[in-house]
Each structure stands twice: as structure tokens, then as C-alpha cells.
Amino acid sequence: MRYLKNICAASVLIAALCSFWSCDKDENTLSEAVLASAGTLNFEAEGAAEKLITIYADADWVTEVPDWVTVTPSSGTGVMDVTISVSDNMRDGAEDNPRKAPVVFKGRTLASRAEVLIIQNGDKYRDVKEYTVGELDALANETVVSVPNVTVMAVTTEGFVVTDEQKTGTIYILNKTAVNIGDKISIMGTKSTDTQSLSIVDCDILTVVSTGGTVTYPEPEDITDKIDSFKSDSREFIEVSGILNGSNISVEGAKFSVNVTDAPASLGIAALNGHKVTVKGYFAGLAAPVIKIMATEIIDRGAIKIIYYSEDFEWLDPWAEAGGVGKTVETDDLDAKATALTSLSIAVEGTPVTAFDAIEARGYKLIYDKNDNKRIYLQRNYLKFGKTGNHAGIILPPMTKVPDNTNVKLSFDWCGMRQGSGKIDPVNLIVIVENGENKAQFDIPELGWEDGHKLEWVRAEVDLTGVTVNKDTRITITQTQWEVSTANRWFLDNIELIKAE
């Protein structure tokens, strides 16, 4: 009797699977490999046109299909075109919420399956639920939300930080609508998390409820003395004091720095370059060795040095993030990913732009031998030059902010590369300053490291007292021995031109 029960149960299971899989194929003839010509298909909510794709297989294949999708044919053999259509996405005479589900074309094994994600439009905000700011963290990503009557607490070029009347928490809103601190707004959008695992809302609909309100900030946590160990999993209100260099704040004796992320022009950050400052704002994540902050206030503590030019390459972070590049120097990892500037592209105002072109658009000139511009690489966020048998360097943009007859000093961080054998690449760096036919060359002290030395940044300083530096001056940082076929690889970051004492 027990044996018969097991047979019956198995028969029922097989019948169910066959009805679900369009099981008119012998399992023994199913394909070992299945591919689809598309990974995603998008359809309108009503009257959507059917779409044609191609299935590639070496034998028979079957399908798994959600009930609102039709695949014709639902099974086949070898390479075949199939038609995919969807039913109207309606409920009670009106568009329902958007929906998505995979259509699976499968063979014999788990490895022999191709998924095509079917996405159908709808009314994203039908039946949307209202939430407080404090409830958003716990929501799953892609949850559609409505958050009414929140107050803007901080503004960046990409969005703003808000809290609600009950002060249940803070969250960053991605939306470029012009709002001001103190404005009360209502938002509708989709909850997600950023690269720092902090909650955000990608806002589609923003309504300004009132303007001109005042805000009260909590007492900030001062992280100046614990900057190297500070961590947080929320958007805490913090402050730090240090020297502002570009958008970075350095603290004496600390390995980490703080970056003012997407600072709006209203903060006046450009005028405070080289000043000691105290910055207050909301924690925006940690990308060691950089802590990010969305600033609400910058307090000027006075000029420490006069900076005419600075570059920390932090603005290249979107390209670095897109390429998933690593940090060879900080991690002492020879295998950390470094991608050629020419191979990293992101959309800028709808147009693909490579990191190489973005750098040169800022006035730099990248130089390289053998007509091979692929030998300059991006790390997060600094540059790597050269590979075995290839050499490269950089010409800085015109120095337009140096007053006439001013003595200046150039400095930058650099590091040579270590080979797999432990040998340090024998890099000899030089700085060349050209004014027309007049040329001055400055040798950078060699690293002098023993084999196996841990990679670390070294600060190079070049006193240019007596050398003319103006908008027509050409300053090059490069290596010597371009003709050698050995490895002469090096890294560059944190370039600065200041008034000499």
C-alpha cells in the first residue's frame, strides 16, 4: 500500500511539472545549453505589441511562464524564434501596479537555462503606502513609497537629506529639484540603498508644501580625533575639523580624510581652499580611506596656506565605481583592479564619456609612448601610469590663479609599483616646467625601497621659487627612461600648487 502511495504521489508531481513546464519534450532529449537573444523585455501597460526573440539550444527546450505572459511556441528544439506577448495590466478598469517576472527557457540542468525578465508598465503609485522616514530603512529595495511633510536638512548637487516632524530618522533623496534647507516637501519614489549600504529614495514626484522654515540640528558627533576608526550604518550628524584641500578635509596625523560630497555652490567651499575649517553635516558613507559627508555648514577657521591649484581625483569616483576598480597602494594588493581610462565610460548628460576624455576635458594632457593611450589606468580615486614596456605621464592644466611674480611650491603623492618577485619598479620621476623655450627640470628623490617593501604613498615636494608659473606655463610630471623595456609603473594622487613661504 505504501509503495502504491509513493507511485501515485510521483505521478501527480510529474503531471504538475509537465503542465507547468509545457512538458511535451522527453527529458532525455533536453538541451545541455540554452541561451536567449535578450535578457530583458519591456511592455506597455495596455495594448502592448508582441516581441520576437531567438532561443539558441543544442537540443530540446521547455519554458516556465508567468500567467500574464504568453510564449509561442512554449517549447522547441534547437535555434528558434519565439514570440512573447503580455495581457493588459489592468485592475477594475484602471492600470494596475507595474509588474515583472522571468520567463525561463530551460534544458536538462540548472546550468542550461536562460532567463528573460519581462517588465510591464503600470501605475507605479496605485495603492502606494505612506511611510515615516524612520520606517524606510527596514523596507525592501524597490518598495514604492510616499513620504509626506518632510523637512529639508541638507542640500547637495544631486539631492537632499530630509527628516520628518517626529524626527524618526534621516534619509537621502535623489532628486535635482531646487529646494532649500528648511523647505517642507512631500515625496514619492522608490526606496533603495547606495554603494555604502545606506538607504536612499529615488524620487519621481516632489511637492513643495512650504518654504522658508527654520531647522534645528542635533548635537553633532565630533569625529576629528577618531577619524581613522569612525564607522556608522546610518546618516549620523557629525563634524570634523581640519585643513580643506579641494573637497577633502585632512586631519593632522590621521590616515583617513573627509570628503565633502557634491557640495553646492552656496557653501562657498572653493573660497576656503587651504583654510582650517570645521564642517558639520550628515555621514554619507565610508570608502576607506575617505569618509563622506553631506555638509550643512562650513566654519572658516582661517587660512593655513594659499592654494592656487589642487587635485585629489575624487571627482572620478563615478567612473571608478562603474569599473569596480581597487586601491593597489592602500591595500598593498598587486591584483587590485586597475582599468584603462579609455575603457571606463559613463553617461554624462546622456552622452557616454570615457574617464580619459573627462580628464583631458579638465585641461590635463595625458602623455604616453608607442601611441598607446591604454596604459594609463584608474584606481579609486587616483591614477596609475605605465605597464611593462610602456611609459606615461601627465601635463597639468594651465595655472590661471597664480599672481604675477609669485613663488610657488608643487607637491604630490606618488608610489612605485612592486613586481610579483618583490622587486620595486625602478621609477625615476621628474617635474618639467616649461615657459616657451625656457625649461627647468626637477628630479624627484627615488624611493630607495628594498625588495618586498609594502606599497605606501610618498609626498614629493618641488620648490619652484624663481621659476615663472602662470597660465602659459606647462608643468609635466613624468618618468625618465622612456626607452627602456622594463616595468616602470607608478601611482599619482593629491597634486597641489601653493604659495611658497
Image: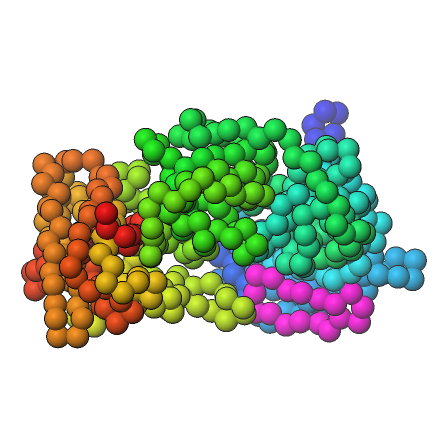
Residue 101 in view in this figure: no
Percent x, y of residue 27: 58, 51
Question: Which residues are drawn in magenta?
Answer: 38-55
Q: Nearer the viewer, residue 375 or 411?
A: 411
Image side of residue 491 versus residue 234, left or right? left
Percent x, y of residue 377: 30, 57
Residue 163 in view in this figure: yes
Q: Nearer the viewer, residue 224 or 169?
A: 224
Image side of residue 306 versus residue 425, left or right? right
Query: Would you say residue 46 sits in the magenta stretch?
Result: yes
For image coordinates 26% across by 38% down, the residue present is: 332
Query: Would you say residue 374 sits in the magenta stretch?
Result: no
Q: Nearer the viewer, residue 182 or 482?
A: 182
Image side of residue 144 versus residue 416, left or right? right
Image side of residue 3 versus residue 335, left or right? right
For image coordinates 88% across by 61% down, the residue present is: 94
**Residue extending farthest right:** 92
